[in-house]
Amino acid sequence: MIISTQFDRCSICLEPKPLTSEHIIPESIGGTLSAELQCVDCNSNLGSELVSQAKQDPVLRLAIWSLRNKLPELYLSMEQGQRYYAKDVSGKEVPVKLKVGRFETEPHKREDGSLILDTKKGEKNMRQQLAKEGLTSNEIERSIQQLREAPENTQIRLSSERVAIKWGVESFFPTLEKPEMDPRLVALVAYNYLCLLLGKDIFNDWFDFLRRFILSGVQNDRLTIETFSSRKYTCFHRLYPEFSHSGTKISLELFGWLVYIIQIKDLIIRAPNAVYIEDLKNKRFLLAESIEQAKRGEFHSNRHIPYDTNEA
């Protein structure tokens, strides 16, 4: 769902440009709520630099791996093209990628000189190699068919010079080689939500330091971001603010496991502590006007997040 903010300028660069929709929680990790917040340039630049990295966060990859049976579609979407390690029957690691719902072995050579190929892509390579050895088309087809019909972990002689082993792989696990989510992306999620809660008050000069941090990482002692882990994985994301006389705290919980606490010192706001939840299993978002209502399960599906006249 797209919320119309009625903004007359971009919430990031503050230029009076046409706006595009931006997901509050990145769509790549299951976010469905979006709003017209940013111009094309800011949306594109932040998307390629920050938002695109969300699904590569190793903690989130572990979360969706653990929830893959409960959230199969989101799992396949998040993990498309991502790298894994598997093990063959000898216990050796095999690098694979998840592509179109199946694990595909990445081509690589081992120390003994053997070439490891994915079964489907390997056939093309074997045809080329057998043709170079002088085999006829019929001979090549017979060798390939013999390999196809062979059970796993069986050695097949394709020619006088070439032997193939159809190995099975198992024990797949994400490689977790990418860095954790950039704090600027966490700040962007919190800022986008504040845009919905505060309306045009978000254009106040007081938020310039937050916009600078999102755009270029310029640090400011008014902003702190802490990371924690919870007790278990869940099929929900949750985002909610807590406004007090000393400042503003925004909590972002992803898959119920990864928790970010964004503290903005001296930001005093009169606004409801509206809770936004992504129900990942049912592909919908839920809104509650307060933390207390959320605890009681009192959600609504209005197109606009309710906010009063606020002062930043």
Image: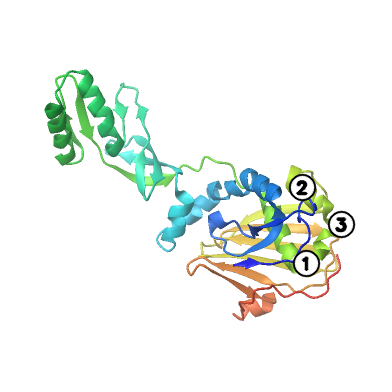
Q: Is residue 290 left or right of residue 285?
A: right
Q: Give the x, y percent position of residue 20.
A: 67, 56
Classify 295 as above or below 111. below
The amino acid beneath tag 1 is Gly
Q: For numbered disc 3, what is the local secondary structure?
A: helix
Q: Which residue is mark 3?
A: 206
Residue visible at 81% across and 69% down in the picture: 244
* Type of amino acid at the residue the image marks with label 2: Phe
Name which residue lies at 74% across and 63% down.
195
Could you tell me which residue is drawn at 76 percent across and 74 percent down?
307
Residue 199 - label: 1
Residue 100: image location, x then y, percent: 38, 49
Q: Residues within 10 Å of mark 3 (few under 14, many from 20)?
A: few
Q: Alpha-carbon distance for marks 2 and 1?
A: 20 Å
Q: Quadrant of residue 35?
A: bottom right
Residue in front for this viewpoint, 43 or 246:
43
Q: Is residue 171 left or right of residue 228?
A: left
Kindly identify the amino acid type of the residue bearing the numbered disc 3.
Trp
